[in-house]
Amino acid sequence: MAITQLVGAKIHRREDPRLITGGGRYTEDLLRPGTLSMAVVRSPHAHARITRLNATQAQALPGVVAVLTAADFKPILTGTHPVAPAFVAQKHTVPERFPVADSEVVFQGEPVAVVVAENRKLAVDGAAAVEVDYEPLPAVTDLLKALEPDSPKAHTNLLDNIGWDLAFTPEDTVKDAFAQAEIVVKERILQQRLAPTPIETRNVQADYNPFDEQLTVWMATQNPHFARIWIAGALGMPETRVRVISHDVGGGFGSKVCAYPEDYLVPAAAKLLRRPVRWTETRTESLQTTTHGRGQILDVELAAKRDGSFLALKVLQYLDVGAYIGTFGAFQTCACLLAGGAYKWPGGIAARTIGILTNRVPTDPYRGAGRPEATHLIERMVDKLAVELNMDPVEVRRKNFVQASEFPFTNTFGLTYDSGNYEGTLNKALQLVGYSELRQRQQQLRQQGRYLGIGFSTWIEICGFGPSGATAGATGGLGLTESAMVRVHPTGTVQIYVGSHAHGQGHETTFAQIASDTLGIPYESIEIRHGDTAEGPAFGFGTYGSRSLAVGGMAVHKASNRIVSKALKIAAHLLEASPDDLVFDQGRFHVKGNPGSAKTMGEIAFAAYGASLPEGEDHGLEAIAYFDPPNFVWPFGAHVCVVEVDPATGDAQIEQYVAVDDCGNVINPLIVEGQVQGGIAQGIAQALYEEVAYDDENGQLMTGSLVDYLVPTAAEIPTAVLDRTVTPSPSNPLGVKGIGEAGTIAASAAVINAIVDALQPLGITHIDMPATPDRLWKQIQQAQGGAR
Ligand code: MCN
């Protein structure tokens, strides 16, 4: 068939027919004969001492095979729970974590025992029959009070609740700039805790074969290779004896990147009991024990001149790390490193982060991880300054943007933005939304007592993790690269094994598009395989941080090019020509000036396994490549949200949402649009709906079901008008940047800025998230002189 250019083509995801017709293969769908079910006995307390645990009754129940406690697991689980050091170097306390508590529980939902039974119902009944007595201890629930010397401690053996305290840059950095400032605006910005809430909850199945000492683990994970290292390490097994398989995964949003107790408990139980064991999280367990995101207080001060030019910024981040430091929890400190946003800060940025231990489930990366927080804080401050100066927020942005001619641009923290044109996306967004007419309409509506607001978010992000040199420190020594293995079979069909592991991002489509164009082989003949450590390349670092295309996709491109190089030599041999005289075009090698004298990739593939090869050439047509990018990639964009707030009810209705993003060259516009729409939905969800709530006194989760934790549906989320500009990244051969988190990074600031803008006539200058009708109504009442 004729081959056309597929990179850039808007083609439907090849995954969709399978996924939307119930044909997906999720871990829960697998059932091996003789599999036992595991249920976890969890602490009902946020903080308590375990005084007695009695399993006699549970053990005696029909169908219960075993009740296992810390004492049973300790001899078999000898490794430690992984915690990446990330950027944190100064004061750093990492409380030790074992998957099952034995004497003290430090968050509600922490495992204290597991029950393994013939089926799930029996396991759950068994778990309910395990008697545990607790002596409740005071719980640490308030971030700032946790820092007071007489605060209770999140673990009784701690001297204080400080997980880390790190000044990326000292406050002195900005002293002069603040002294010269003509205006300083300040705000305390709250980032509520969020629950990632993927549709498929976490699950693990394991089968241990004692004869070949092989452990197979099936699990919903975003990074099977990392999981294999962790599980092998914890069980003291060689990495090569552990196989992790992750078929389809129903979303993760970052929550399936880190290590969890059950990832160890299920394999350990399978090994101890010599039977396959499985466990699937309930929705309440998911809300209670799957890591949360955000959970921060950010104190921000912006120093500027009265003409709107920025001088310097101060950021102090208080981050609720929860009861243990999450595997990649410290990554959320990148809110500090990105706080400067798309702007120049001649007087510098002072940034300090304090990670605070509390008696709540650990926080870890959730879609955007640090970058939505950075965007929200800086975009709120820009708008606040604009109000104080009575300037148009667009003008303030224009005045301070890093200019297109100034790239590569190195920020205060030594991070180099690769390429950009920030004003370009803003201009396009203004045009799309009809900005000047909107402002006129706003004035007219104000005269009628109606509250229309326009909010901006000119966001940037760092993604595409990442250069091995820059990331090795953050992972404990392994530098984040990505790999691909391309195998062209004799019939010309291709299998490509990749180390990244899509869980909703459509890599099977986009990676095949790249390979098809590079190899000149029809898209339909190319299969992308991922998620099984036994069949993939040597190592993959997983799918998160919008890295898969910019790193993993480039490994596919690099390995495919290696195939083309070998194919060129075989073609030259078959055509009895010099390789220098051949042209590769549309899947055919032909002699320059003689298109009739040609060999197709299919013919070359067949020949590669045949009897006639160039001298010294190996048989076969396969290649493996690792891609280690020279820099991160830096997408950006401009989002505009238009809301109308009803002062009688506090309801904020989004009237229009426009997003112009730039992720460099685009492989598949349809997938990119889907990613942006989905991301925006999650940003709007944070701005208006979602919040993990705990009881202040006892650290009890109050949002333990989807009735209480308000995930919006399609009915609440508007369809955004999307457009883009294209500024290629110089950091990879296809000039691409990531897009998987962009919408979430941008949206909350645009929505809240719009609401604040709407309520400006009432003198309201800031609103915390989520801006629920209740919260807005109270603030409006207060502003109008009401008693609330
Ligand atoms: N793409 C493209 N052209 C570009 C950029 C990306 O065609 N210039 C395509 C890619 O080829 C890929 C998709 O867009 O098919 C996303 O690519 P990328 O930005 O590299 O992000 P990742 O694949 O690494 O995905 C991770 C990202 C993150 S960090 C979160 S969180 C997230 C997200 O993706 N979680 C998701 N999107 C999600 N989508 C779904 N359905 N479910 C989740 O849990």
Image (cartoon, rainbow, N blue to C red):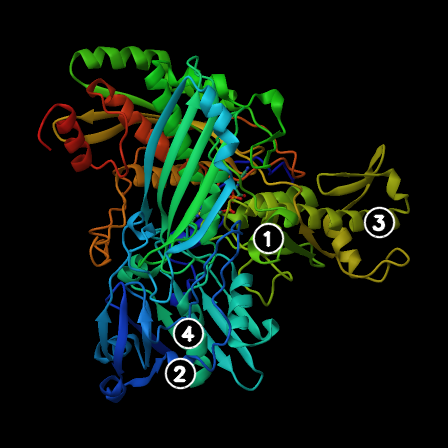
The image shows residue 63 at horizontal and vertical percentages of 28, 85
Alpha-carbon span between mark 1 and mark 3 = 41 Å
Amino acid tagged 2: Asp
Judging by the rendered image, the residue that carries numbered circle 4 is 266
What's under tag 1, amino acid-wise?
Gly
Answer whether labels 4 and 3 touch (C-beta < 8 Å).
no
Q: Is residue 131 left or right of residue 549?
A: left
Circle 1 Cα neighbour tier, 10 Å, few/some/many (<14 / 14–19 / ≥20): some
Q: Residues under labels 3 and 2: Cα distance?
A: 60 Å
Say the numbered circle drawn on residue 569: 3
Which quadrant is the C terminus positioned in? top left
- Pointer 2: what residue? 72
Marks 1/2: CA–CA distance: 35 Å
Q: Secondary structure at mark 3?
A: helix
Q: Residue at x 59, y 50 (%)?
A: 471
Instruction: Residue 99 in the image: state x and y as whole percent.
Output: 40, 71
Residue 621, above or below 266: above
- First in sequence: mark 1 vs mark 2: 2
* Distance between mark 4 and mark 2 Cα atoms: 13 Å
